[in-house]
Image: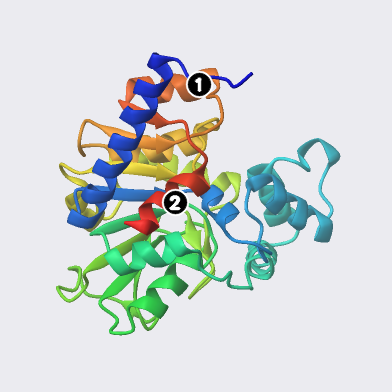
Amino acid sequence: MTDVASPEAVAQSQDVLADIQGLITGLKEGRVLPYLGPGVLSLIPDLPVPASPEVLVGQLTAKATVPHKIRNRLTQAAQFIENFKHRKSVVQLMNEAFAATPTPSPLHLWLAKVAPPMVVESWYDDTLTAAYAQVRPQGDWGQVQGLSQSEHFGTWTAFYDAQSQLVTDAALPASWASLVYRPIGGHQPAGNYLVSDTDYVEVLTEIDIQTPIPMDVQRIREGRSFLFLGCRFNDQLTRTFARQIMKRSSDRHWAVLPEEPTRMEQRFLDEYNVTRIPMPLADVAGLITAA
């Protein structure tokens, strides 16, 4: 016997598809800003880099001895390595973990082609910037990365142009059509990482008053919505960064979240008016890139 979808399920599916079509238009027009989590790497086969905190901490602790009770906790394990070896050891291990550049997925390439005013990328790999370099050789883009206070005390972020050169001007270059915002750092070009407990404590102490968030990011987000792709909100750090980056933006957002939300995730979605799109990321990415 063939299952027949209920009228309610059909209506919900139609609403979701309408939402996605509206989001695609919003992305093209710059009204919707993509916010990428490590889950977007699931779109890439034969991935050469860790795609989750769990996999990353496994790689770190395979090369550095840490107490058993924190072996599965990324920030605590990184802090232990930093305390008992050196900050340079943490950076070296992170550089090794993300040394390879994944082949950009069609979604990464599509985003680089569309070049939204800003893309938030909350993982350490170089996939998106590689897509920008491939699609936009004219170099009309740049990135800004969060900095560890252990290495750059008093300086919260660093801007780099498309040639990976440090930008020291106070204002965002007018020639940049798109900004890649990497709030927890990234592998290229300088191995900047927020990964240890201390890194996050320093940022979280100031993030409520927006100090670690660049003024250009604050300006670009005004009145715009975010589309979360490959993100989970079942961790306090993830929720805190998303909440603070969303501050003073639009009052409506979306998240592709095929998994049933946890209690804390649902609370976050409800509190910040984030509409859940309960479809597999690969399906949504296919609809976006076909547009």
Amino acid at dot 2: Ala
Secondary structure at numbered mark 2: helix
Secondary structure at numbered mark 1: helix
Amino acid at dot 1: Met
Residue 220 horizontal side relative to residue 62, left or right: left
Expressed as whole percent of the image width and height from the top left, the position of residue 209 reads 28, 39
Task: In the rendered view, tell whether residue 234 sits above or below residue 92.
Answer: above
For the question of whether residue 199 can be seen, the reply is no
Residue 47 horizontal side relative to residue 108, left or right: right
Residue 68 horizontal side relative to residue 165, left or right: right
Residue highlighted by disc 1: 264
| Towards the viewer: 84 or 140 | 140
| Towards the viewer: 154 or 256 | 256
Residue highlighted by disc 2: 285
The residue under the point 26% across, 66% down is 178
The residue under the point 56% across, 47% down is 198
Which badge, 1 or 2, is on the more N-terminal residue?
A: 1
